[in-house]
Amino acid sequence: MNRFKIRTEVRFNKNALDTLYEFKGMSAVIITDKFMVSSGMINKILNKMEGYKNIAVYDKITPDPTTTLIADGLKFIMENKGEIVIALGGGSAIDAAKAIVLMGERSGMGDLKLIAIPTTSGTGSEVTKFAVVTDPDEERKFPLVDEDLIPDMAILDPELVATAPPSVTADTGMDVITHAFEALVSIHNNDASDALAEKALLLSFKYLPFAFKHGDDTKAREKMHSASCLAGMAFNEVGLGINHGIAHALGAKFHIPHGRANALLLPHVIRFNAHLRDCFGNEPTQAAKRYADIARKIGLPHDNVRIAVESLIEEIMHMMRRMDLPATLWEAGVTKEQFVAEKADVIKSAMADICTPSNPREVDEAGIERILSHIAPDI
Ligand SMILES: NC(=O)c1ccc[n+]([C@@H]2O[C@H](COP(=O)([O-])OP(=O)(O)OC[C@H]3O[C@@H](n4cnc5c(N)ncnc54)[C@H](O)[C@@H]3O)[C@@H](O)[C@H]2O)c1
Ligand SMILES: [Fe+2]
């Protein structure tokens, strides 16, 4: 049996922020980061919140939220007793708000309405049951998974993403592409997730380069915002794979932005999953055929599965170069010494990551080491 559920009500594009007028008279807590306040971006939200009983702003979110930050945010919402919680920001703010709300509800605060307003087109967190939290003591990132983490409502206003600098656009856009590919080849994939993942990929390959180059291109921002949400819906139901499993481990150890860690790995994970060596005389793997199908749909050479997969990998690497993304851990700022010291731990965490089991090709420690060797050359 397959199942597919979308719980979040998504309001998107023009005037979507007007949704906030509907909660007049209620008390709200906004969970966000310092940049949203200092840049004045928060005013776009506050302008729609006239007539609220009370508005409290918690602006302490930092990238890759930690368990300590979640505990602090929980204290804040308990003191301020918001009936609705508005998460404004990238995946970090939304994930933190999701974890804080869940803990609030489980500590007796009753049902809180969670509205997610993403300002990056990346994580899809506004529609997912995942919240990625970092344990600072163990330098470990772990996804919390709970249906109750799914936001009640998501408001997608592409204007809020317009200020994202090119590097954030590139990182988060590659996160979208990685979500969509991992959902597409997940062992749990189904027709519904395929439709969402495929659309997310077609939009991303077409519009991410524009959004990167012309941050004020409204159409490109709008399409990437949709792609991010669609990819989130897809992987929410069918899971991810080793790309995210390894990226979580690298992110926690070396503080590489999440999307950038995914991008670094993506070409090598696609090659690993496609398992092209099997093409000689053997039927290509399901994953290879799915990658090849996307290559065909985005207009890359696709004479046979091998050529299609190779051209897809080449296209991704080309896109990454054009967006100034690193191709190795060294280019991403990790030193060889750091990597050597942490390698065994990275492999262990990646194997234990909750995303790893839905990968289409079974992986062991040696497999992860091989994938890592491509982004950690010459050691
Ligand atoms: N919950 C999920 O399903 C899920 C999926 C993938 C990743 N994640 C997690 O989400 C986090 C990453 O989220 P992210 O990639 O959105 O980045 P982020 O939220 O960490 O933001 C990155 C930086 O961009 C800035 N920023 C955000 N929006 C901006 C804007 N419009 N203009 C200018 N600057 C802006 C932020 O202030 C921050 O400094 C990681 O912790 C990752 O593990 C969660
Ligand atoms: Fe991700």
Image (cartoon, helix red, strand yellow):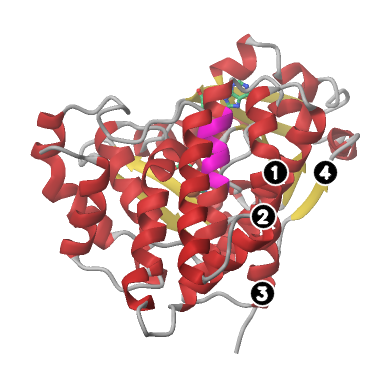
Quadrant assignment, res 7:
bottom right
Residue at position x 70%, y 41% in the image: 224
Q: Nearer the viewer, residue 346 or 104?
A: 346
Residue topped by disc 4:
12
Residue topped by disc 1:
206
Does residue 248 appear to the left or right of 159 in the view shown?
left
Does residue 182 appear to the left or right of 368 in the view shown?
right
Residue topped by disc 3:
4
Residue 107 visible at all: no
What separation in Å lies between label 2 and label 3 (alpha carbons)?
26 Å
Quadrant assignment, res 164:
top right
Please name the amino acid that badge 3 sits on: Phe
175 in magenta: yes
Residue 267 visible at all: yes
Q: Is mark 2 within 8 Å of ligand 2?
A: no
Residue, far bottom: 1
What separation in Å lies between label 4 and label 1 (alpha carbons)?
20 Å
Q: Nearer the viewer, residue 365 or 314?
A: 314
Under tag 4, what secondary structure?
strand
Under tag 1, what secondary structure?
helix
Please name the amino acid that badge 2 sits on: Ile
Please name the amino acid that badge 1 sits on: Lys
Residue topped by disc 2:
298
- Determine contact: label 4, label 1, CB under 8 Å: no
What separation in Å lies between label 2 and label 1 (alpha carbons)?
8 Å
In which quadrant is the N terminus drawn? bottom right
Disc 4 residue crowd, few under 14, some 14–19, many 20+, Cα 10 Å: some
Q: Which residues are magenta?
A: 169-176
Residue, far front: 303
What separation in Å lies between label 4 and label 3 (alpha carbons)?
21 Å
Closer to the N terminus: mark 2 or mark 4? Answer: 4
Closer to the N terminus: mark 4 or mark 3? Answer: 3
